[in-house]
Image (spheres, rainbow, N blue to C red):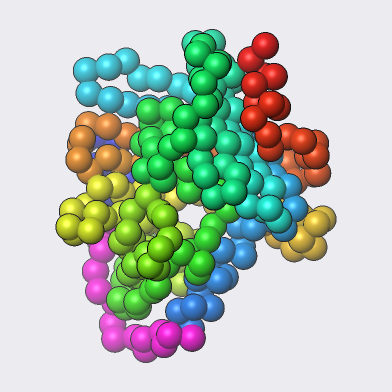
């Protein structure tokens, strides 16, 4: 049995409708999305070290190492790849609602869309940025469902008009007990399933700037539903919530890392 099938058996094989449960109304749905966002926000700065393992059909598996820098107060994000050697110095910068990629081999910056596959993996910018579900989507409650041993709220999200997101329709399975997202499916406007993600491990860390815990997915598993053989596993190794350098979220700073 493949790793994907094993994970599916563990998390989704027993996906059954739970006994009748009271539906969440519009106010409760909005509050739930705000809770999901707030749990992952620091209110200050954020730095993490992550590893990405990519599997593609007829290609050797690739393991990448990257640093993630966030400044939630200004909606800024930096992704800097450090390994392997051939990709060291490459990166992404989100500022003023634009996503830019940088290649030190050419010295060029290119503007990217929200659908951009980060470094050719199955991940997207939003997977590493602060959560903005309440800001970007309208939600509908689809009921309670069993996902493996967990009882979850199943939510259907549709992107708000004028908001640029990777996928306009999203379905979420949220653990009723912990409010951790366990599964996410993303769809094109046509209704075609494009990507499935699982979040089997969550961790929390106390934030001095927030004066509360910050939650983050320690492991994320992304499956391409178009190219079925493609998948990416992301493991967050360390998280640091101390203040970052003031000028870190600039093109000049990222360029300096490859000199």
Q: Is residue 115 at all visible to an observer of this figure?
A: yes
Q: Does residue 22 belong to the magenta stretch?
A: yes
Compared across the picture, whether 227 is left or right of 207 comes to left
Question: In the drawing, does residue 207 fall left or right of residue 196?
Answer: right
Magenta-drawn stretch, dominant element (helix, strand or loop): loop
- Taking the spot 57% from the left edge, 42% from the top edge, the residue there is 94
Does the rendering let one see residue 178? no
User: Is 91 on the left-hand or right-hand side of 1?
Assistant: right
Vertical side of 224 occupied by 37: above or below: below
Which quadrant: the N terminus? top left
Residue 15, x across and y down, in percent: 26, 63
Q: How many marks?
A: 0
Region in magenta = 11-27
Quarter of the image holding residue 22? bottom left
Residue at left offset 63%, top offset 52%: 75
Question: Residue 58 location, x and y as percent?
Answer: 22, 18
Who is closer to the viewer here, 165 or 1?
A: 165
The residue nearer to you, when weighing 206 against 84, is 84
């Amino acid at each position: 049995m493949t790793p994907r099938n094993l994970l599916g058996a563990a998390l989704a094989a027993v996906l059954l409708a739970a006994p009748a449960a009271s539906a969440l109304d519009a106010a409760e749905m909005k509050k739930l999305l705000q809770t999901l966002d707030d749990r992952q926000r620091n209110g200050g700065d954020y730095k993490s070290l992550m590893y990405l393992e990519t599997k593609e059909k007829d290609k050797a598996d690739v393991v990448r190492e990257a640093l993630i820098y966030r400044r939630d107060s200004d909606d800024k994000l930096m992704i800097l790849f450090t390994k392997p050697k051939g990709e060291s110095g490459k990166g992404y910068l989100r500022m003023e609602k634009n996503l830019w990629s940088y290649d030190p081999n050419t010295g060029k910056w290119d503007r990217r869309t929200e659908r951009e596959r980060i470094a050719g993996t199955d991940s997207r910018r939003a997977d590493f940025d602060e959560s903005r579900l309440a800001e970007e989507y309208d939600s509908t409650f689809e009921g309670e469902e069993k996902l493996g041993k967990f009882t979850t709220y199943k939510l259907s999200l549709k992107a708000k008009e004028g908001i640029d997101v990777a996928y306009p329709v999203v379905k979420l399975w949220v653990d009723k007990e912990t409010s951790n997202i366990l599964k996410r499916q993303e769809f094109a406007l046509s209704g075609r399933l494009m990507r499935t993600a699982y979040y089997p491990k969550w961790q929390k860390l106390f934030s001095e700037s927030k004066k509360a815990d910050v939650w983050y997915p320690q492991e994320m598993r992304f499956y391409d539903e178009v190219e079925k053989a493609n998948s990416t596993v992301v493991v967050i190794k360390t998280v640091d919530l101390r203040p970052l350098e003031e000028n870190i979220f600039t093109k000049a700073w990222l360029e300096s890392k490859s000199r």
